Image: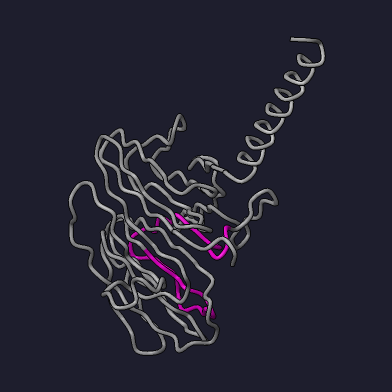
């Protein structure tokens, strides 16, 4: 082969390598895994309430942390016995509470009241406006996740509902609340957003979760430990993922996580 031929091959290889580099670079930009370690979360201890913030909330603000809209709040709260949140108001927000331990008693100004216990979930659609209180009336600490999702409909009639989650198999994916059309006729708690709140249980081994196009997820481990590729995720850590069509959870022990699957363009 002459010099011209060698230059052609070299040029071709250079272009191919450049193309592969660009593809890899674009993939890294599009695919993102952000790990929020529990010990590094925002924190405010009020005495009766020890709150950890996955996103900016109340008096906690970190300019490096951005909401993953439509998900805007994920608080990890520990509430002491015989204390709680007095009457306060919300508007145009889907507020989901998942009880990890203990119980909480809800009461609002539209006639709803009820106690939700460990393994139960409630949804409050604040809509045009609702005032409510939440108290731990028990003799033990209450541990809960409170999740706020921006609605896709404003000023709807406010409502509140809760369900008791029956024990599923050790390896299960259960939709707890959703506004996705595919769950419209199910008994899943409704939210006013094209998003789903999902509980995933697993023991040692792999479990695959598939994402639809133009979706991203945020999840928090309620208990246990797992790996995503080589990243170790521990109890109460949060993880944000976009740019993938599936997630392979590698469980290292009995694990439970709560995941929000939501649209990117919102």
Q: Which residues are magenta?
A: 68-97
Prevalent SS, magenta region: strand
Residue at left 29%, top 43%? 255
Residue 134, compared with residue 54, is above or below; it is below
> Does residue 28 appear to the left or right of 246 in the view shown?
right
Residue nearer the viewer, 215 or 83: 215
Residue nearer the viewer, 132 or 196: 196
Q: Quadrant of residue 80?
A: bottom left
Q: How many marks overall? A: 0
Residue 258, compared with residue 83, is above or below; it is above
**Image quadrant where one finds the C terminus:** bottom right
Residue 182 location (% of width, % of height): 36, 71
> Does residue 54 appear to the left or right of 60 in the view shown?
left
Residue 61 location (% of width, % of height): 66, 55
Residue at left 26%, top 44%? 202
Residue 39 location (% of width, % of height): 50, 40
> Does residue 251 appear to the left or right of 45 in the view shown?
left
Q: Residue furthest front?
A: 1
Residue nearer the viewer, 141 or 73: 73
* In magenta segment, residue 76: yes
Give the color scheme: rainbow, by chain, secondary structure or one colour.
Answer: one colour
Residue at left 40%, top 55%? 259
Residue 199, compared with residue 84, is above or below; it is above
* In magenta segment, residue 221: no
Residue nearer the viewer, 44 or 63: 63
Residue 111, compared with residue 209, is above or below; it is below
**Image quadrant where one finds the N terminus:** top right
Residue 225 location (% of width, % of height): 35, 37
């Amino acid at each position: 082969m002459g010099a011209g031929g060698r230059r052609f091959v070299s040029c071709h290889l250079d272009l191919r390598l450049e193309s592969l580099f660009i593809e890899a670079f674009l993939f890294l930009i599009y695919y993102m895994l952000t790990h929020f370690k529990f010990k590094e979360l925002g924190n405010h201890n009020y005495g009766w309430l020890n709150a950890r913030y996955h996103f900016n909330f109340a008096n906690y603000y970190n300019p490096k942390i951005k909401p993953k809209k439509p998900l805007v709040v994920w608080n990890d709260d520990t509430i002491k016995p015989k204390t709680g949140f007095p009457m306060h108001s919300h508007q145009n927000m889907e507020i989901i509470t998942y009880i990890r331990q203990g119980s909480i008693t809800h009461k609002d100004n539209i006639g709803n009241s009820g106690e939700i216990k460990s393994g139960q979930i409630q949804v409050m659609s604040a809509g045009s406006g609702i005032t409510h209180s939440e108290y731990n009336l028990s003799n033990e600490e209450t541990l809960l996740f409170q999740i706020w999702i921006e609605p896709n409909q404003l000023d709807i009639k406010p409502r509140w509902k809760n369900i008791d989650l029956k024990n599923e198999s050790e390896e299960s994916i259960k939709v707890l609340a959703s506004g996705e059309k595919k769950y419209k006729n199910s008994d899943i708690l409704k939210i006013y957003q094209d998003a789903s709140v999902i509980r995933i249980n697993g023991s040692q081994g792999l479990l695959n979760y598939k994402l639809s196009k133009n979706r991203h997820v945020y999840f928090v481990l309620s208990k246990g430990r797992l790996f995503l590729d080589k990243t170790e995720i521990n109890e109460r850590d949060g993880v944000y993922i976009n740019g993938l069509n599936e997630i392979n959870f590698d469980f290292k022990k009995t694990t439970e996580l709560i995941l929000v699957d939501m649209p990117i363009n919102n």
